[in-house]
Amino acid sequence: MDRSSNLLDEALGLDDYQTKSSSVASGRVVLIEDCVETSGAFVLHHLIKRSLTPHSSGIVIFVAFAQPFSHYDRVLRKMGCNLVVQRDNKRFLFFDMLTLECPDGDGGKTNEGGLLELYGKIHEAVEICALSEDNRNCITIMIDDISLMEVAANGSSNHVLDFLHYCYTLTTQFGCLLVSLNHEDIYSSMEGPTLILQMEYLADIMIKAEPLATGLATDVHGQLTILNQGISDGLGNSRNKLRNFHFKVKENSVDYFYPGTRG
Amino acid sequence: MLVHQETQGLFLVLYQVQYRLKMINLSVRDTEQEKDLRIAWQYKKYFGEHQQNFEYQRNGKPEYCNDFDLRKPLERHFLSGQCIDCISLQDSPNLATLNDRCSTFLAQLPRCDGNVMCAGRIAIQSFCAPQCEYSNMDWNMLSFIRSLKGMIRSSNAVAILTFPPSVVSSSFSKRLQHLADTLLSVRAIPDEDKELAKLLTGYQDMVGLLNLHKVARINTQVPVILEATTFSIKLLKRRSLVLECLNQAPVDASSGTSYATSGSCSGSSKTGTLDF
């Protein structure tokens, strides 16, 4: 397994693979933003793999609105991570939400019903995982993706936001890491406090995947901008760290490099 | 309008293409241009380079791949159309009826391993156009497409959807574009544009341009970067439609009119007539 650190890991504070901090510091909220031209799904895959490294005892709770299990399994398998085995070992808990439909108010249930039920399941899973001392502080909740959760909630972004706030409480209560993906371009033409703005407010780390201004290229698939907020310098001060670099996505890994450093 | 064929899969007359992709989202300004659309993408080269992407059947587990040949010609007998079914939604109060029809149809085409002999196709034209009864029900439409996509993932079927982006909000359009696995756009080119006529060879014969924005990324995280994403659309004797690459590379400068050979999707020895 490739244990070398890369620019993404460094930006996320994961640069030391030898320590136990193979996942992003617990209790934080990570938001991945992408657009039609450039998908940010590879960052999710990377974080799944990091959370499930053999020498850690991390657990991933994955809420999938975008793809079936087989897709993630096949992608991660090429990266050297077998999700079927991890699922059998109860380290990868997969919630297939592809067909989740939150019922209308007519049926006596609110739109929130489906999401509340989902949160109940996540909460229960987190509680069970947290009972084991080994797993404490190593639970990662991932949501792929929030825009489809909105569709499932029939457009009620308030219910989605409520759901995210509930999940946010898990980050403080159980030290979970919350990672979610959303598409920024959906909201770029909207005015007012959009869902993505609220998510940015909640996030400690924002990862933005964008295309290059110069268009598509085979050597560079896009650029990542990472804003890591509230990093402690050990003296009681906190600061923000902004990183920007290019990437090229491959089947088994992703190359990260600074602009102009590729021949 | 939904058109489907009950036996040999599903085929829409507007698109004479065999797609191996799950959902095609095509924004259309001039529906006339859709006639006899024949798409010829330069996919063959990818088969040599990316053989390592293919997964073979191991331990009885299903094989899969993530490289698809969109140029593979569809044999005529698949198009003879024994049971093409057109349904109208004029009388249904909501999209549940359409959803049920799609569900019933796709239930006949469960995802199975091995050689696929039958593929379903669902084609929906101008879904969000003002004359569509549900055009003011954004979330219902998105919910339906999401549901359709979920059903398609578990069946041997493809859905092609067209929508006019100019009549929907930018936000809604982006949502649709994200839902699509493969995204194309078609636009007309203006008549008697002298500037454009100087730039484009064969301008007089062109009726429009086709842009390829996104290619499906199923079972892989690697984006497909094509050499060319813009094609000119020409009609030949009003009978066949030709796509020609505008941004031609010096070496591979052949026109995209026709391809005699066909690549197969999977690296498997079991090469089927239809790939899934």
Image (spheres, coloured by chain):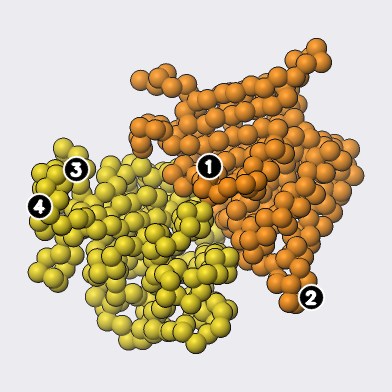
Chain colours: A orange, B yellow
Distance in Å between CA atoms under marks 3 and 2: 59 Å
Q: Is residue B71 above or below residue B197?
A: below
* Nearer the camera: disc 2 or disc 1: 2
Residue A231 in the image: x percent, y percent? 72, 22
Q: Give the residue pinned by disc 3.
A: B248
Q: How many marks?
A: 4
Distance in Å between CA atoms under marks 2 and 4: 62 Å
Local packing at callout 2 (Cα closer than 10 Å; few below 14, some 14-19, many 20+) is few
Three-letter amino acid code at the position of disc 4: Gly
Mark 2, secondary structure of its residue: loop
Residue B112 in sight here: no
- The answer to which of marks 2 and 1 sits earlier in the sequence is 1
Q: Give the residue pinned by disc 2.
A: A108
Q: Residue furthest top?
A: A235
Q: Give the residue pinned by disc 4.
A: B202
* Nearer the camera: disc 3 or disc 1: 1
Nearest to the observer: residue A47 or residue A55: A47
